[in-house]
C-alpha cells in the first residue's frame, strides 16, 4: 500500500484542493477549469506505477496551487494527472485507442506492433492514432529464479513452473521471444500468468520456480522478494541472443548490475525502451503543455528524488528509439527546443 500512497499522493492533494474550490471553501480565488488526465501503468509492484506517479505530480497544477514562479507547481494549469494501475503495455495501448486512458506507458516494441498491426497485434486493425509524448528509459528483461530451483540458464526452464506475466502485458510477448530463441515454448513449461507482485509472492511461497518481468530496475516487487527469498537473476545471453537482435531490432544488449536487488549478482540481458504514449485526437495545446511541464527544470528535481529510474528519464534521450509518430503537441515542443529540424 505504501507504493500506491506514494504514487497517488499528488493526485489526492489535488483532489482535496479541487473539492474545496467546488464547495466554496476557496472563496476569494477565481475558480479554474479542472481537467483530469490518466496515465496507464502496470501492476503496482513494477516500475511504471511509481514513476508515473512522480510524473503525474510534476505535470499537475490543480486550482489553488502556488505558481511555478512562486516555488509551487510547474505543471499544466488546472490539470490533475493520475497514475492508473493496469496489466501493462498491451493493455495500455488498447485502452488509449479505445478512450479508456488519456495516455500510458508502453514498451517500444509493443507500441510499434500496435501501430503497425504486426507482432503480438498480427491480424488486428493497426492502431494508427497512437502517438508518442516521449521516450523514457531502457527496460530490462528480468528472468528471476529461486536459488533452490537450480535454474542457471534459459534452457534450464524446461519443465519448470514459470510465470510469463499477464497475456496483455508487455512482458508476455517478449518472454515468448526469449523462449523461442532458446528452443523453448509455452508447452515446454508449466506456465502461469501472474502480475509482477503476484508472481513475486508465488515464487516466495514456492508455487513457481521462476518469473519473467520487463521493466526498469529496481522494481519494488523484486526488491521486496530479494529481501525475503534467495533468488538469482538468470542471464539472457549467448549466440541465441545474436539471432534475436538480428530479427528484432528493438532489442539491445544491456546488463542488470550487481546489487540492483539486495544481495543478488548482476547479469547480462537484453533491454527495450519504455515510452509515454497518447492518441492523436487529444488537443495539440494540451500535449504541448504536458510535454513542456515534463521537461521543466523543476520536474528534473522530482524525477531525481523519486523512483530510482527517474534519473534515466532525460530530455536528451526523449526521442531515442521512437518507431511511431510524435503527437503534434509534443513535436511542437521538441521543434521549439531545437531537437527536431
Image (cartoon, rainbow, N blue to C red):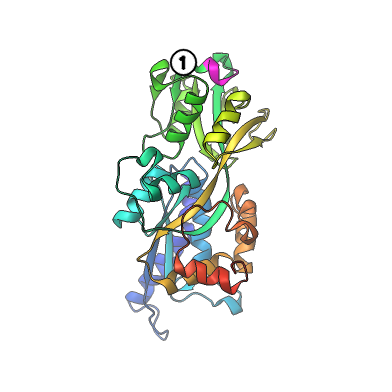
Mark 1 Cα shell of 10 Å, populated few (<14), some (14-19), many (≥20): some
Quick one: quadrant of the C terminus?
bottom right
Q: Which residues are magenta?
A: 152-156
Residue 169, percent from left and from top: 41, 39
Where is residue 70 drawn, in percent x and y?
60, 79
Q: Quadrant of residue 219?
A: top right
Q: Main secondary structure of the magenta part?
A: helix
- Side of 329 where 260 appears, left or right: right
* Res. 248 visible in picture: yes
Q: Residue extending furthest right?
A: 258
Residue 98 drawn above or below residue 118: below
Residue labelled with disc 1: 160
Q: Position of residue 197 (x, y in %)?
A: 46, 35
Q: Nearer the viewer, residue 177 or 14?
A: 177
Residue 60 can be seen, yes or no: no
What residue is drawn where x is 47% and y is 25%?
A: 180
Looking at the image, the residue that sits furthest to the front is 246
Which residue is nearer to you in this view: 72 or 322? 322
Residue 305: name its quadrant. Answer: bottom right
* SS for callout 1: loop
Magenta run includes residue 154:
yes
Q: How many marks?
A: 1
Residue at the image position 35 percent from the left and 52 percent from the top: 127
Based on the picture, tell me whether residue 68 belongs to the magenta stretch.
Answer: no
- The percent position of residue 314, horizontal first and vertical second, equals 63, 58
Q: Residue at x 33, y 55 (%)?
A: 97
Q: Is residue 182 above or below residue 333?
A: above
The answer to whether residue 225 is above or below residue 19 is: above
Amino acid at each position: 500500500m505504501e507504493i500506491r500512497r506514494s504514487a497517488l499522493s499528488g493526485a489526492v492533494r489535488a483532489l482535496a484542493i479541487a473539492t474545496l474550490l467546488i464547495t466554496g471553501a476557496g472563496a476569494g480565488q477565481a475558480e479554474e477549469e479542472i481537467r483530469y488526465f490518466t496515465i496507464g501503468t502496470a501492476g503496482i509492484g513494477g516500475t511504471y506505477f511509481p514513476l508515473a506517479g512522480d510524473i503525474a505530480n510534476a505535470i499537475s497544477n490543480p486550482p489553488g496551487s502556488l505558481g511555478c514562479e512562486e516555488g509551487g507547481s510547474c505543471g499544466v494549469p488546472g490539470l490533475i494527472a493520475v497514475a492508473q494501475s493496469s496489466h501493462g503495455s498491451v493493455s495500455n495501448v488498447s485502452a488509449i485507442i479505445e478512450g479508456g486512458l488519456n495516455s500510458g506507458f508502453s514498451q517500444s516494441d509493443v507500441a510499434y506492433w500496435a501501430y503497425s498491426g504486426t507482432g503480438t497485434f498480427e491480424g488486428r486493425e493497426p492502431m494508427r492514432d497512437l502517438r508518442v509524448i516521449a521516450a523514457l528509459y531502457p527496460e530490462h528483461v528480468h528472468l528471476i529464479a529461486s536459488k533452490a530451483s537450480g535454474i542457471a540458464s534459459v534452457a534450464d526452464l524446461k519443465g519448470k513452473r514459470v510465470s510469463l506475466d499477464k497475456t496483455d502485458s508487455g512482458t508476455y510477448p517478449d518472454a515468448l521471444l526469449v523462449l523461442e530463441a532458446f528452443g523453448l515454448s509455452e508447452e515446454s513449461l508449466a506456465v502461469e500468468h501472474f502480475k509482477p507482485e503476484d508472481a513475486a509472492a508465488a515464487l516466495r511461497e514456492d508455487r513457481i520456480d521462476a518469473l519473467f518481468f520487463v521493466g526498469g530496475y529496481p522494481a519494488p516487487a523484486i526488491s521486496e522478494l530479494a529481501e525475503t527469498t534467495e533468488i538469482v537473476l538468470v542471464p539472457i545471453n549467448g549466440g541465441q541472443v545474436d539471432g534475436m537482435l538480428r530479427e528484432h531490432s528493438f532489442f539491445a544488449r544491456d546488463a542488470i548490475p550487481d546489487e540492483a536487488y539486495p544481495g543478488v549478482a548482476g547479469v547480462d540481458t537484453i533491454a527495450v525502451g519504455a515510452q509515454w504514449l497518447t492518441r492523436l485526437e487529444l488537443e495539440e495545446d494540451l500535449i504541448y503543455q504536458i510535454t513542456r511541464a515534463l521537461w521543466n527544470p523543476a520536474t528534473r528535481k522530482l524525477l531525481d528524488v523519486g523512483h530510482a529510474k527517474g534519473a534515466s528519464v532525460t530530455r536528451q534521450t526523449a526521442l531515442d528509439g521512437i518507431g511511431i509518430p510524435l503527437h503534434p503537441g509534443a513535436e511542437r515542443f521538441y521543434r521549439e527546443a531545437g531537437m527536431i529540424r
